[in-house]
């Protein structure tokens, strides 16, 4: 099992920046692909960015150029640096990983951290 704990959310003005952190438990963190998702009120959860164990990153079109995902395997931590934030970036941000077991894949989620972009 993997437990994920996010932090770093908060209230920020449009154009501001935030860095989210997600700390994972267990000794397999370094081999996991990690992702950041977000869910705004009344909307479906959507992928923001993901990063493989080797450090290859993938970004949603809406965030390309405005965020950077990174990881520190020694700290079991994945980060999401977000810049030039817009009001439409307001959402609960979740950390995620998926592990495939013999009987199928299982998604693990953190509890989420609220990001509010408002003046």
Image (cartoon, grey):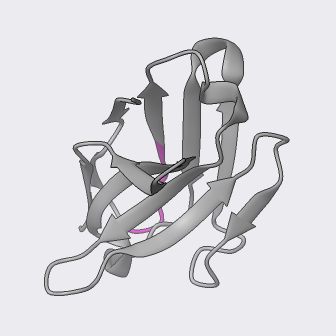
Compare residues 9 and 39 and report the one nearer the observer.
39
What stretch of residues is rendered in magenta?
14-19
Q: Does residue 113 lie above or below 30 as drawn?
A: below
Compare residues 115 and 59 and report the one nearer the observer.
59
Q: Is residue 68 left or right of residue 39?
A: right
Which image quadrant is residue 35 in? Answer: bottom right
The N terminus lies in quadrant: top left
Residue sticking out furthest to the front: 103
Q: Is residue 87 left or right of residue 22?
A: left
Residue at 61% x, 77% y is 60
Viewer can see residue 45 = yes
Residue at 60% x, 27% y is 29
Is 17 colored magenta in this rendering?
yes
Residue sticking out furthest to the left: 42
In x, y percent, where is residue 105?
48, 57
Which image quadrant is residue 23 in? Answer: top left
In x, y percent, where is residue 86?
41, 75
Residue at 58% x, 15% y is 27
Tell me which secondary structure the magenta stretch mostly adopts: loop
Q: Is residue 57 left or right of residue 40?
A: right
Residue at 38% x, 73% y is 89
Which image quadrant is residue 84 in? Answer: bottom right
The C terminus lies in quadrant: bottom left
Q: Does residue 9 lie above or below 62 as drawn?
A: above
Compare residues 95 and 14 and report the one nearer the observer.
95
């Amino acid at each position: 099992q993997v437990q994920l704990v996010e932090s770093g959310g908060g209230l920020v003005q449009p154009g501001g920046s935030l860095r989210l952190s997600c700390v994972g438990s267990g000794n397999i963190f370094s081999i996991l692909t990690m992702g950041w998702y977000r869910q705004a009120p009344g909307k479906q959860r959507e992928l923001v960015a993901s990063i493989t164990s080797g450090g290859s990153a993938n970004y949603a079109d809406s965030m390309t150029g405005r965020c950077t995902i990174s990881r520190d395997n020694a700290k079991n931590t994945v980060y999401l640096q977000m810049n030039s934030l817009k009001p439409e970036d307001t959402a609960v941000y979740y950390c995620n990983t998926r592990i495939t077991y013999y009987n199928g894949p299982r998604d693990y989620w953190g509890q989420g951290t609220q990001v509010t972009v408002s003046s």
